[in-house]
Every structure is written in structure tokens, then in C-alpha cells.
């Protein structure tokens, strides 16, 4: 079972990286074309955050299955921070009126989360792609 969890955790990484890049690209497109905040921005940002949450759950399942070594401390911390950073604009902007919502928080959060994810992957000396 632990082996299946490990492969799932490793495979979801590619979906997360793709979702993060797509969230950034769509946010940049919306910002440059002055489209403003639309459902596409929300969908891409929510998908990115949701995949990160799935990855955190898979990671904790791996920890509880007995796969822990000291180098994972930095990895866990960076990944949890990435999940929080990606979720903040989704949660905050959902509560604002539509005319007050902007694309920039999603763009910044996705970029910061991707940097944290890359740092977290490199902290356990795994290849990014």
C-alpha cells in the first residue's frame, strides 16, 4: 500500500506543476488583456489549490505508512506553506464582491507557491520533472 501511495504522490506532482503554470499563464493573460477577474481565473486557481491539498493528504498518508527520514522536514514545511499560499487568495477573494476582485493575488500566490514547491522537491533531492 505504501508503494502505491508513493507513486501516486510522485505522479500528482506533475499535475500540480501543470496546474500552477496554467494558473499563472491564465492570470497573466487576464491581466495583460485587461479582462479582469472572471470564472477562468477562479477555476485555475481553485484547481491548483485543490491539487495541492490532495498532495498534502497523500504526503501525510505516506508519513503514517512509515516512510519518514530526516530530510523530509524541510520538504513537509515548504509544501504546507505552498498549499497555504495557494489557498489564501481563493478563500479571501471568494468573500469579496465581484467588482473588488482582481487577478493579481492569484498570479502572485501561484508564482510563490510554485517556487516553494520547487524548493520542496529539491530539498529531498528529487528531479523537478
Image: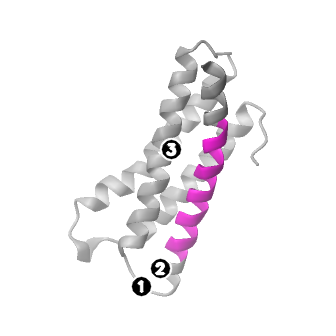
Please give the label number shown on residue 4.
none
Q: Residue at x 57, y 57 (%)?
A: 20
Mark 2 closeness class: few <14, some 14–19, many ≥20 residues within 10 Å? many
Mark closer to the chain start, 2 or 3 = 2
Residue most extreme to the top? 66
Please give the label number shown on residue 52.
3
Q: Are marks 3 and 1 in contact (CB under 8 Å)?
A: no
- What are the residue bounds of the magenta stretch? 10-28
Residue 73: x %, y % from top left: 61, 23
Q: Residue at x 63, y 27 (%)?
A: 4
Q: Under tag 2, what secondary structure?
A: helix
Q: Nearer the viewer, residue 36 or 63?
A: 63
Tell us which disc is closer to us: 2 or 3.
3
Q: Which residue is mark 1?
A: 35
- The answer to whether any part of residue 74 appears in the image is no
Position of residue 62 relative to residue 18, above or below, is: above
Position of residue 60 relative to residue 89, above or below, is: above
Amino acid at each position: 500500500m505504501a508503494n502505491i501511495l508513493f507513486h501516486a504522490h510522485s505522479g500528482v506532482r506533475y499535475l500540480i506543476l501543470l496546474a500552477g503554470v496554467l494558473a499563472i499563464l491564465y492570470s497573466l493573460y487576464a491581466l495583460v488583456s485587461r479582462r479582469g477577474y472572471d470564472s477562468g481565473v477562479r477555476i485555475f486557481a481553485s484547481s491548483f489549490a485543490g491539487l495541492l491539498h490532495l498532495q498534502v493528504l497523500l504526503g501525510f498518508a505516506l508519513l503514517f505508512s512509515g516512510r519518514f527520514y530526516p530530510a523530509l522536514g524541510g520538504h513537509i514545511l515548504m509544501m504546507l506553506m505552498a498549499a497555504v499560499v495557494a489557498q489564501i487568495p481563493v478563500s479571501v477573494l471568494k468573500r469579496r464582491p465581484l467588482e473588488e476582485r482582481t487577478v493579481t493575488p492569484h498570479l502572485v500566490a501561484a508564482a510563490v507557491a510554485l517556487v516553494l514547491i520547487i524548493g520542496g522537491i529539491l530539498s529531498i533531492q528529487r528531479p523537478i520533472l
